[in-house]
Image (cartoon, rainbow, N blue to C red):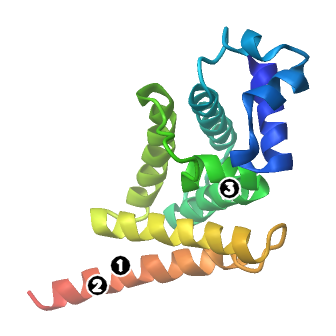
């Protein structure tokens, strides 16, 4: 099945995530289309396996990270790995982070991998002092916007992603300032 999913990713990179078809995939792997139904009962089942595969790839990348002891530096390194992963493969990013396929919802099992990625990010954020859920949500939205801006406006470049550390510092400094201000008013 891994070879079939790899071939599906190749098709997605060539034709866009919406351009993946079971017919083209069967041709790509040297099968007849009905034979693919032994692996995937629908196109959405294929997308589900691709979604899980993409998140497993991301988890493997995060597993290889060596985070520094300093929480702020650790957050920046973690987020750099995430952002680099997201922008290096626009087709994979579209399936994992943009939900462009009408009617596709990841299965509970596949979505579990995405929850694990988010859980790891939240752990690193909390260690850096981002404890309020609204601040976590703002950071996630900021990273998503950064990835979208990069993919939309400078694919293959670094115009937007080069600001990642600056944005992290701004967010962390804002949170620290807000906490200090609150303490001063008590």
* Viewer-proximal residue among 41 and 52: 41
The residue that mark 3 highlights is 86
Location of residue 161 in the rendering, given as x and y in whole percent from the top left corner:
70, 73
Location of residue 85 in the rendering, given as x and y in whole percent from the top left corner:
71, 52
Dot 1: element: helix
Location of residue 75 in the rendering, given as x and y in whole percent from the top left corner:
54, 61
The quadrant where residue 6 appears = top right
- Tell me what residue is drawn at x 86 percent, y 14 percent: 31
Quadrant containing the C terminus is bottom left
Q: What mark, if any, has residue 178 been given in the picture?
A: 2
- Tell me what residue is drawn at x 64 percent, y 53 percent: 94
The 10 Å Cα crowd at callout 2, few under 14, some 14 to 19, many 20 or more, is: few
Distance of mark 3 from mark 1, alpha carbons?
26 Å
The 10 Å Cα crowd at callout 3, few under 14, some 14 to 19, many 20 or more, is: many
Mark closer to the chain start, 3 or 1 = 3
* Viewer-proximal residue among 70 and 127: 127
């Amino acid at each position: 099945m891994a070879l079939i999913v790899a071939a599906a990713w190749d098709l997605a990179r060539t034709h866009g995530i919406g351009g993946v078809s079971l017919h083209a995939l069967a041709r790509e792997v040297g099968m007849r289309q009905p034979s693919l139904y032994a692996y995937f009962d629908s196109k959405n089942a294929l997308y589900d396996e691709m979604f899980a595969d993409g998140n497993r790839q991301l988890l493997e990348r995060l597993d290889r990270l060596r985070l520094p002891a300093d929480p702020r530096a650790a957050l920046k390194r973690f987020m750099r790995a995430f952002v680099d992963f997201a922008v290096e493969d626009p087709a994979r990013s579209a399936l994992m982070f943009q939900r462009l396929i009408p009617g596709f919802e990841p299965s509970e099992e596949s979505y579990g991998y995405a929850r694990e990625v988010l859980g790891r990010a939240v752990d690193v954020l909390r260690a850096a002092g981002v404890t309020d859920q609204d601040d976590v949500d703002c950071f996630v939205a900021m990273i998503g916007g950064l990835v979208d801006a990069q993919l939309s406006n400078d694919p293959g470049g670094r115009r937007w992603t080069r600001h990642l550390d600056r944005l992290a510092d701004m967010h962390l400094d804002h949170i620290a300032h807000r906490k200090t201000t609150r303490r001063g008013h008590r």
